[in-house]
Amino acid sequence: MLDRAVEIARAARERAYPKPTVGAVIASAGVAIAEGATEAGGRHAEVVALEAAGARARGATMYVTLEPCAHHGATPPCTDAIAAAGVARVVVGARDPNPVAAGGVERLREAGVEVEVVDSFEARQLHEVWRTWVAKRRPFVVYKAAATLDGRVVVPGRRWLSGEESRRLVHELRARVDAVAVGGGTARADRPRLDARDVPTPRGQPRRLVFSRSPLPDGLALEQRAGPLDADLAALAAEGVQSLLLEGGPTLAAAFFAADAVDKLWLFVAPVLAGGGPSVVAALPSARTLSRLRAQRVGDDVLLEAYVHEP
């Protein structure tokens, strides 16, 4: 049933942004009797499910992707609604990292509700952007790069390394993040637009940034951040930027890795051997071990996804 709660939240497609879109299922005797997802600016998933279940919630089990809130915010505490409805047991996919809203597990137990915390990776992954933003007070950073089979990011005479399908997927990713960034060298050489093109943009275009201390050419429609990096990331987080797509190049990526500020890697590998040239990341002070490696075919390319920091 927790898997179903994750599916419900994913299907809602972050409709509660900038708050987490939570999924909830109420079940009795192993059969789901009500479901809910957090509404945009409205009810939390637990309350949606409770109102759908009505009296059937008494003695039932609730499965929820994120620890129910225990504070008065835009809505009353979900923990109070769960206890008042007579729910006997709550299965929590992941703890709430927000110190303001946390404590729901303890509050439910004090009210006599049995609580199990599963600490599900799928539930944590569902809210990975928001969790990083709340807990670390910086954006969730994805480093995206395209490379050859021998790990090079430039092939002389070729503008694109990856294929059309991969490039469209990048535009879809841009449409889902709050900001996209490059370094000064990439900005001067390529004059990138960094916008999401030919894909739906329900949240509008991302902020387009360049991290550089040096002057930039006139007419470059990018917002300059001059560092230091940790201060820039903290400022972006304070401005509501929860997610940042880092698109280049190797020197900027190395700076982010050195600051331990990369959370996830998207590497599009093209069926090409370059034989030389700059690599995916410039020299690092130490090796990085990634986790949850996943590969998928995208046209003629292979997309490798892995975590530097699991959510």
Image: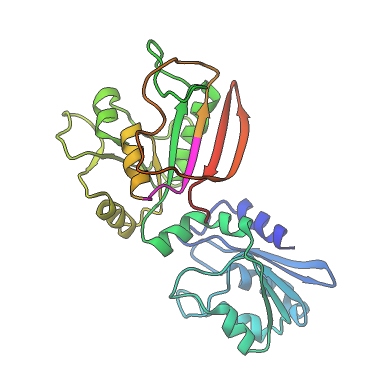
Query: In this view of the protein, can residue 131 be seen by the observer?
Result: yes
Report the front residue among 234 and 37. 234
Question: Going 22% across and 50% down the picture, which residue do you hit?
Answer: 228
Question: Going 74% across and 78% down the picture, which residue do you hit?
Answer: 57
How far across and down, in percent of the image, does residue 277 sit?
37, 19
The residue sitting at the top extreme is 157
How far across and down, in percent of the image, does residue 150 sit?
49, 22
Query: In this view of the protein, can residue 200 be seen by the observer?
Result: no
The residue sitting at the right extreme is 29
How far across and down, in percent of the image, does residue 249 sit?
34, 32
Report the front residue among 73 and 282. 282
Question: Going 58% across and 63% down the picture, which residue do you hit?
Answer: 22
70 vs 21: above or below: below
9 left or right, relative to 128: right
Question: Going 14% across and 34% down the picture, which residue do you hit?
Answer: 215
In this figure, which colouring scheme has been used for the structure?
rainbow
Report the front residue among 133 and 219. 133
In the rendered structure, does residue 262 fall within the stretch colored magenta?
yes
How far across and down, in percent of the image, does residue 73 sit?
45, 76
Report the front residue among 198 and 294. 294
**Which quadrant would the N terminus be assigned to in this image?**
bottom right
287 vs 248: above or below: below
67 left or right, relative to 184: right
Residue 66 falls in which quadrant of the image?
bottom right
Which range of residues does the magenta coloring cover?
Answer: 260-266
